[in-house]
Amino acid sequence: MSKISLQNMKFHAYHGCLDFEKRDGNTFLVSVEMELDTSFAEETDNLKDTLNYQEVYDVIKREMEIPSNLIEHVGRRILNAIKESFPEIKSLKVKLSKLNPPLGGDVESVSIELETEKQ
């Protein structure tokens, strides 16, 4: 098994419960870590024999474009969409962070991490 990760993909999106978050949006970071068998691609050196990172990014981007109230909901949608699109993934971790959340203080980010494994 190997781990492939895409780290800190930056998106401007409209997730939040407050009116100004829905109107103005905020900056979000998404990281994913995927465990899968890459042994065949390690030998063939052929993209068709492994996970295409661009396709993973496109799935995440599509989910980030759908406004939601909660990052928990967005994180679950990303996790489910990746699982559905790439059945070869054995385990998956998604981290979603909202930068500079409106909490009335100097807070770098709030984050949620979700994980799943194939049974």
Image: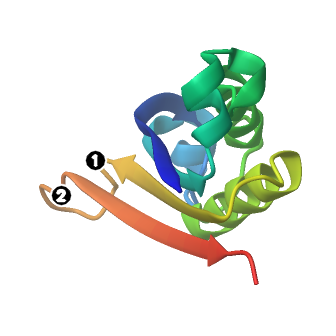
Task: State whether residue 5 is above or below residue 19.
Answer: above
- Determine crowd level at label 1: few under 14, some 14-19, many 20+ residues with C-alpha closer than 10 A: some
In the rendered image, the residue lying farthest to the front is 43
Q: Give the answer, above or below, for where 77 lies relative to 40.
A: below
Q: Amino acid at mark 1?
A: Asn
Q: Is residue 10 left or right of residue 78?
A: left
In the image, residue 84 sits, relative to residue 70, either above or below, namely above
Q: Position of residue 55 (x, y in %)?
A: 74, 26
Instruction: Say which residue appears at 53% left-offset and 56% top-offset.
Output: 1
- Asked whether, in this view, residue 43 is left or right of residue 78, the answer is left
Where, by quadrant of the figure, is residue 63 drawn? top right
Q: Residues within 10 Å of mark 2 (few under 14, many from 20)?
A: few
Task: Give yes or no for contact between labels 2 and 1 (Cβ–Cβ under 8 Å).
Answer: yes
Residue type highlighted by circle 2: Val
- Front residue of this view, candidates 93 and 41: 41
Residue denoted by label 2 = 107
Residue in the foreground of this view, choosing between 61 and 93: 93
Q: Position of residue 11 (x, y in %)?
A: 51, 30
Residue at disc 1, secondary structure = loop
Say which label, 2 or 1, has the lower sequence index. 1
Q: Is residue 4 visible?
A: yes
- In the displayed orientation, state which residue is furthest to the top: 46
Q: Nearer the viewer, residue 64 or 115?
A: 115
Q: Disc 1 designates what residue?
A: 100
